Image: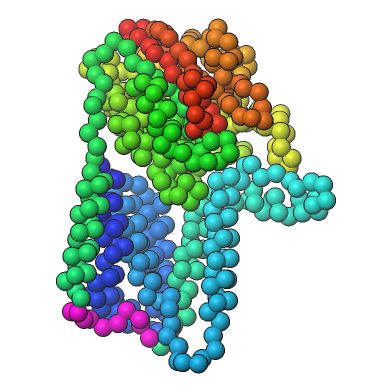
Amino acid sequence: TEYATFVPLTLVATLLPLLPWVRARAREFVAVFDQTLRGWVWLLLIALLVILGTRLSGIAAGVALVVAQFFVSMLWWWLARPLPDKTRHATGLWVVLGVGVFALLVAGDYFTYEYAYVQDFGGNLAFLDRFIPPLLRGFRGLGLGVLLLAIFFAALPMTQTLRRIPWGGESRRGLIPLLLIVIAATAGAAYLARPRLIAPVQNVDTIRIGTYNIHSGANEFFYPDLEEIARTIRVSGADVVMLQEVEAGRLTSFGVDQALWLARRVGMDRRFYATNEGLHGLAVLSKVPISVSDGVLFTSREQQTGALQVQITPSATITVTLYNTWLAPLTVRTGGEDLEAQEQDQARQFTELLAWVAAQHPGGVLGRTVIGGTFHNVPDSPLAGQMRAAGFEDPFAGLPTELSATLWRSDVPHVRFDYLWLRNLGRLRAGVIDPDFPDASDHRMAVAEVSLGG
C-alpha cells in the first residue's frame, strides 16, 4: 500500500541529512548560487514541492512530499549560529518569539478547518465583532497558505545566513554508525508499517452495516480516544462502517491518519475522501472486499462537505453500493448564518446528494444501496420524508428515541442525527450501540444487519 511504501521513504528523507556525505553534496549544490540567493532558492524548492504534493495525487504527490521532507530536514543545521565568547545576543527573546509565531500558525491551521463555527463575541467585546470573527472565518481555503507561511519562517535562518554554509565538509568520521542507524530505523519502520492481513467477509447471506460520527476521534469534551472508538467498532460486530468527521493528519489529532489507524486496529480495509483541506472528511472501513470508490463535494456556504461512494462485493454476483455523507448542521450561533439559511444550505446539499446518486445509476436502477451518515436532522424532517418517498427503508423506524438516538451530548436532548437508508436490502435487526458504553465520541454508532437477498 502507499502507507507501507511511504513510511520508510519519509523516515529516510528525515534521517539522510545526518550523513556527512549527504550534507557535503547539499553544500556543493547551494554553493553554486550567490550567498544572497541560496536561502531563497532552498525555500522556493520546498514551497514548490509542497504545492505539487498537495495538488497532485498518488505516487507523484507522495514523492514530491518525501523530497520536501528531505529539504526541510536539512534546515536544522541553520538554526544555530556560533557566536564569539561574551558577545551580547538576544537568543532568549528569539526563542520566545519563535514559540509565539508557532502558536499563531497553529491557530491559523485550526481555523482553516473550523472557520464555520466562529461566533461573535457580543456583550462588552461586541466592538471586536467587526474585525476578529470575519478575519477568522476568512481562513476558509487557506490551508496551503498557512503551510507555505510556516515554510517561510522555517527557512528564514537560511536566507539570513550569508557568510557560511553550516553543512560542513565531507568527513568519514562516524559515517558507518550513522549509516547503520539510518538503515536500521528504515527497516524497522518498513516492518511496523507493513500491510495488515484482512480476513475478508465473502459468500455470506447477511452483513452488518454501521454508521459512526467519530467527532475527529474525541468525545464531547474533546478528550481524544481512538482506542475506545476502535473498541466500539469491534463490539458492534459491523462488517462495514461509514465514518464521518474523520481526520487524516491534522495538528489537532496529533498527525494521526484516523481512518488508517482504525482500519489497521480493527482489521479492515479503508477508503477516505477529504472534504475539507485534504485532511478532514469521510471514510468507509470494510471487511467485505471493496471494488470501487469515488467522492464528490457539495455546494457549502459554511463548512465544506460532500459524499463518499464505495462499492463492496460480498460475493462474485452481489454488489452493494454505499453512500456516506455529512450534511450541514442546523445550529443557532451568533454571527453565523441564520437558521433559515442553514436549512437552505442543508436542503441544497441533500438535493445534490440524490442527484449524484441518480447519476451513478443510469436508468434509475439502484440495485442494493445504502445511503448513510450524519444528516443533522430528525426522523420526521422533510429530508427523511424524501428518502422514504424515494423508496428507501429506515431500519430504525418505530424504535423509541432512547434506543435510536445517536447524538449524545450533555447540553442538548438526545436525538437521532445519523441514518442508514436501505434499498433492495432486507432489514433483519437494527440498533444503537449500548448507551451505557463508554463515550468515545459525542455520537453513538448505529448498526443494521441486512439480508443480501433483498
Residue at (43, 9) in percent of width and height: 429
**Residue 247: in magenta span:** no
**Number of marks in picture:** 0
The foreground one among 413 and 115 is 413
Residue at (22, 64) in percent of width and height: 181
Residue at (43, 78) in percent of width and height: 80
User: Could you say where residue 58 lies in the image, as x and y percent from the top left?
Assistant: 31, 46
User: Could you say where residue 392 lies in the image, as x and y percent from the top left?
Assistant: 48, 12
Quadrant for the C terminus in the image = top left
The foreground one among 422 and 15 is 15
Res. 385 visible in picture: yes
The foreground one among 11 and 46 is 11
User: Could you say where residue 440 lies in the image, as x and y percent from the top left?
Assistant: 49, 33
Decide: is 89 above or below 446: below
Res. 284 visible in picture: no
Q: Which residues are magenta?
A: 164-173
Quadrant for the N terminus in the image = top left
Q: Quadrant of residue 20?
A: bottom left
User: Could you say where residue 273 lies in the image, as x and y percent from the top left?
Assistant: 42, 37
